[in-house]
Image (tube, grey):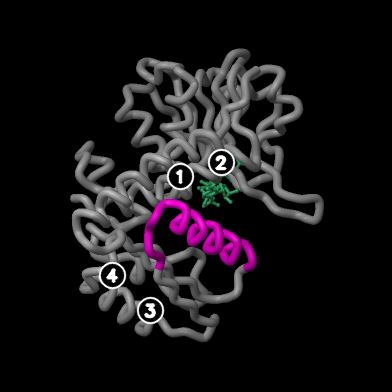
Amino acid sequence: MRIIDGKKTAADFKAEIRARAVAFEKARGRKVGLAVIKAGDDPASAIYVRNKIKACEECNIASFSYYFDDKVDESALIELVSALNDDKNVDGILVQLPLPRGIDERRVLSAIAPEKDADGFHAVNAGKLFLGERTGSVACTPRGIIELIKSTGVDICGKHAVVVGRSNIVGKPVAALLLQNDATVTVCHSKTRNLGEITRTADILVAAVGKKKFITADMVKRGAVVIDVGMNRDDEGLFGDVDFESVKDVAEYITPVPGGVGPMTIAMLLLNTVDGACA
Ligand code: NDP
C-alpha cells in the first residue's frame, strides 16, 4: 500500500500557482484577487475559510473577506455578489457553504458571474463540465481528486471507477471528470442495492458519502486506488468515509484523512482563481 500524499501534491501546485500569481502582479500591477463570503457561525466553515485565506497569502493572492451573521438576508448576499462581479480587483468569488437556513444557496451561487466562479458550482460551469467543454472552472474537490489519482501514475483510461455519492459538489462532477478521462464510471448512492458487490469491482474507488469509516476492507478490490473524500468530525477527531486501518492492507494506493483530498481542494480553488485572472 502506498499513501497518496495530498499535502505534498497540493504544495507542488501551490508553488506553481504562486509563480503565476507573481508574474500576473508584475504584468498587471495588481494582485490576483479572491473574495470570500461567509455567513453564519458554522464552526467547520470558519476553519475552511481561515485555511483558504492563509493559502491565498502563501500564493501571493489578495483575499477580500466578507463575514455576516446568520440573520443576513439573501438579497444582501446577492447585492454583494453583484458588486464583486463588477469589481476589477476580484478575479474569483467564493461563497462558503452551507449558508444559514432560509437562504436559497442556488440563487446566491447563480448570482456569481460564471467567469468569477472560483468554486465551479455555477450551473454554466457545471453544464460545461458535462458537455466536455474545457473553458469553465471545474469544482475544486473533483478537480483535486483527478490530480491525486494522476499523481499515482495509474492510468485512468479504461479503468472501472466507482463513485459512492452523487452530490452536486463532489459525486456528480467527479463522475463527469472520470468519464472525461476515459474511465468506465458507476455512480452509487443511498438507494444502490448490493453496494459492496459494486465497489469490489472498482479499480478506482471514490468515497464521498459523509459517513465515518463507511467503506470497509471487504468492499474494496485488492490493488485498487482508494480516494477518501469524507470529512466527518466527532468527539474523537476527524475521520474519512473509508476505514483506513483495514482498507490500507487491500488498496494499492489510498488517501489519508486528513492530508489527502482536503489540501487539494484548497489548491484547486486558488488554481481556478488564477486561471480566471489569466483568462
Ligand atoms: P452529501 O451529503 O451531499 O452527499 C452524500 C452522498 O452519499 C449522497 O449522494 C447520498 O446518496 C450518498 N449516501 C448516503 N448514504 C449512503 C449509503 N448508505 N450508501 C451509498 N450512498 C450513500 O455529501 P457531500 O458530497 O457534500 O460530501 C461527502 C463527504 O465529503 C462529506 O464527509 C463531506 O464533509 C466531504 N467533503 C470533503 C471535501 C474536501 O475538501 N475533502 C469537500 C466536500 C465534501 P443520496 O443522494 O441517495 O442521498
Q: Residue at x 64, y 67 (%)?
A: 43
Q: Is residue 78 left or right of residue 100?
A: left
**Circle 4 sits on which residue?**
111
Q: Secondary structure at mark 2?
A: loop
Q: Say few, some or many: other residues with alpha carbon within 10 Å of mark 1 (under 14 / 14 to 19 / 20 or more).
A: many
Q: Which residues are magenta?
A: 43-63
Which quarter of the image is occupied by the N terminus? top right
Q: Is residue 273 left or right of residue 68?
A: left
Q: Quick one: 31 or 100, which is closer to the camera? A: 31
Q: Residue at x 70, y 44 (%)?
A: 239
Q: Secondary structure at mark 1?
A: helix
CA–CA distance between discs 4 and 3? 9 Å
User: Of label 1 and label 4, which has the lower sequence position?
Assistant: 4
**Circle 3 sits on which residue?**
77
Circles 3 and 1: CB atoms closer than 8 Å: no
**Circle 1 sits on which residue?**
141
User: Of label 4 and label 3, which has the lower sequence position?
Assistant: 3
User: Of label 4 and label 2, which has the lower sequence position?
Assistant: 4
Q: Is residue 140 magenta?
A: no
Q: Quick one: 195 or 269, which is closer to the camera? A: 269
CA–CA distance between discs 1 and 2? 8 Å
Mark number for residue 229? 2
Q: Is mark 4 within 8 Å of ligand 1?
A: no
Q: Is mark 1 within 8 Å of ligand 1?
A: yes
